[in-house]
Image (cartoon, rainbow, N blue to C red):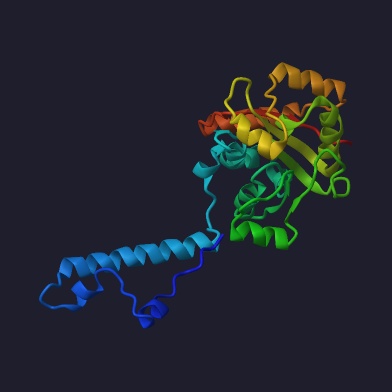
Amino acid sequence: MSRRPVNVSRRLADGGSIPFVGSIQSKSNSSPLLSIGLVVVGAILIVGYVYSNSGGASVDIKGLSRLEGGASCTSEVLQALPVLKKAYGDSSRKVLHVGPDTCYVVSGLLKEEETEAWGVEPYELDDVSANCKNLVRKGIVRTADIKFPLPYRAKSFSLVIVSDALDYLSPKYLNKTLPELARVAADGVVIFSGYPGQQRAKDGEVAKFGRPAKLRSSSWWIRFFVQSSLEENEAAGKKFEQAAAKKSYKPSCQVFHLKAYP
């Protein structure tokens, strides 16, 4: 949110004073170093103020490394983008991301050559940047409850990437959400999920997501995929592992590759 700038001219007209103005104007007490220092500090403050209200042009991966004070897989998606592109090739040109902080992921994807991207934020967008508001206004990012059918036609996207969101769903809703993700994908679904034992800030989670995260083991997920008639994409998974090894990349979240529905 932008802060209302102080009207300096009005304060001067009302007889107010700005600290150090008298010392700067007085030749006998002025100091060149003080004047230069004030100018530099003022310039830094102005640049910082303008940039903070512009929404920023870059993707702040470090700022996404923790979600509400705990571990986050959204930052993992951003770091894994080069590996995903190697593994999926042309299938990574039209991507849907589903999960918290989707604006940041979509912004990163849109910077990639020949890549179209959209995002679904499963929760309320609070205190978002100007860049995120712009993505929402253009319809590129939207909020939607993923426990219900997604507002897209079948095979609307070549690749669907989901991070963090599934960790907050019970099996009852996973049975509805995962098939929906596979429905809107043409070539595959990539799931980024936390490892059991990763720390999450429970107070912040409950306030935003309605319940604490349920971090499940890889064996649990594999059994669930089988029970839900979702087939793992072994070919894509192998390519992902090979590309990750070449780039010395080791994910800090579990990564699952699923086939889209025929």
Q: Quadrant of the N terminus?
A: bottom right
Left or right? Give the position of 212 relative to 152. Answer: left
Looking at this view, is 3 or 161 the one in front? 3
Q: Position of residue 137 (x, y in %)?
A: 72, 62
Left or right? Give the position of 186 relative to 136. Answer: right
Looking at this view, is 252 or 121 the one in front? 121
* Residue lying at 34% horizontally and 80% vertically, measured from the top left: 15
47 versus 206 height, above or below: below
Q: Is residue 78 visible?
A: yes
Looking at this view, is 238 or 37 the one in front? 37
Say how many tags the image has: 0
Q: Quadrant of the C terminus?
A: top right
Q: Is residue 163 visible?
A: no
Looking at this view, is 163 or 156 the one in front? 163
* Residue lying at 31% horizontally and 71% vertically, measured from the top left: 18
105 versus 22 height, above or below: above
* Residue lying at 60% horizontally and 55% vertically, measured from the top left: 111
As drawn, which residue projects farthest toward the bottom?
13
Quarter of the rendering containing residue 227: top right
171 versus 94 height, above or below: above
Q: Position of residue 82 (x, y in %)?
A: 58, 42
Q: Position of residue 141 (x, y in %)?
A: 72, 54
As drawn, which residue projects farthest toward the left?
28
As drawn, which residue projects farthest toward the front?
15
Q: Position of residue 204 (x, y in %)?
A: 62, 36
Left or right? Give the position of 229 relative to 63. Answer: right
Quarter of the rendering containing residue 85: top right
Quarter of the rendering containing residue 36: bottom left
